Image: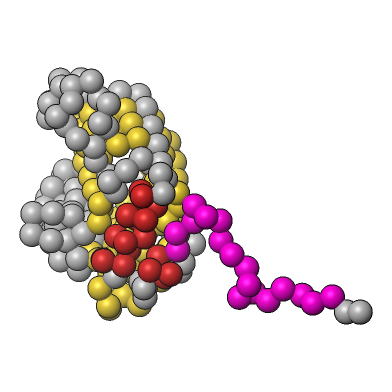
Amino acid sequence: MIAKTPSAAAETAPLDWFNVKNYGALGNGADDDTPKIQAAIDAAVAAGGGTVYFPAGAYAVTPTAGGPALSIGGNGIRLVGASSKASTLVKKANGILLRMSGAPTDTSGSKHRRYCSIENLGFNGNGKTGLLLELYYNDNSYFRDVFMSSNNDLCIDAVEFWDSRFYNLVIEESTGTANSTTQPNVWLRNSSAMTGWGYSEVISANCW
């Protein structure tokens, strides 16, 4: 008797693995993938945490007026790509690409966004203004092998951002504050923290 070999189609992903293509994202750089990717993120949040996976592709996302294209509304969420050059989020309009921020209203810090990460993923500002990544009221986050490019503004803005790590963060062809030639691309701010605490123990390793 010959044993049957399971087909690739029969393989299943872990229950805490949310592939954006399973939610309808195309990753072709043209069609707007914003609602599909947000649906995958929201599913991970509803599950209590998990990995949102981006197979190789360029994922077009569009910020809304006064709001981000994508937002992480829970803790323990990982955004993971195939590699920082193979899987890229591409901003299609001015505004914030990704908001990974907690609520500023509780001075105890209990409503901070916590234990989230971004790994092996690219962010392309596409010459637009607005942040690539907003990190307000955020603790214990982790960023590894992230490539940011072509943003006509700050790439990362962090307020009350605690105990977090950057490893191999690369930023190129971005201006800092819109149209500037001298401003930084990463801004760690304490003067804007509503609690007055500012940021603490942010370790930047291999960032350029």
Q: Give whichever of 78, 43 is nearer the camera.
A: 43
Q: Give whichever of 119, 109 is nearer the camera.
A: 109
Give above or below for 71 relative to 165: below
State the residue at coordinates (68%, 76%): 7
Residue 185 seen anywhere in this rendered image of the structure: no
Give above or below for 172 relative to 1: above
Residue 183, quarter of picture: top left
Residue found at the far left of this picture: 65
State the residue at coordinates (40%, 37%): 115
Magenta span includes 12: yes
Could you tell me residue 28's position as x and y percent? Answer: 35, 77
Q: Give whichever of 129, 14 is nearer the camera.
A: 14
State the residue at coordinates (25%, 73%): 32
Magenta segment main secondary structure: loop
Magenta span includes 133: no
- Seen in the image, is 48 located left or right of residue 188? right
Residue 22, quarter of picture: bottom left
State the residue at coordinates (72%, 73%): 6
Could you tell me residue 59's position as x and y percent? Answer: 33, 69
- Seen in the image, is 176 located left or right of residue 18? left
Residue 178 seen anywhere in this rendered image of the structure: yes
Give above or below for 15 relative to 7: above
Q: Give whichever of 58, 68 is nearer the camera.
A: 68
Could you tell me residue 27's position as x and y percent? Answer: 37, 73
Question: What is the quadrant of the N terminus in the image?
Answer: bottom right
Could you tell me residue 86's position as x and y percent? Answer: 45, 66
Stretch of the chain drawn in magenta: 3-19
Residue 69, quarter of picture: bottom left
Question: What is the quadrant of the C terminus in the image?
Answer: top left
Give above or below for 145 relative to 18: above
- Seen in the image, is 32 located left or right of residue 80? left
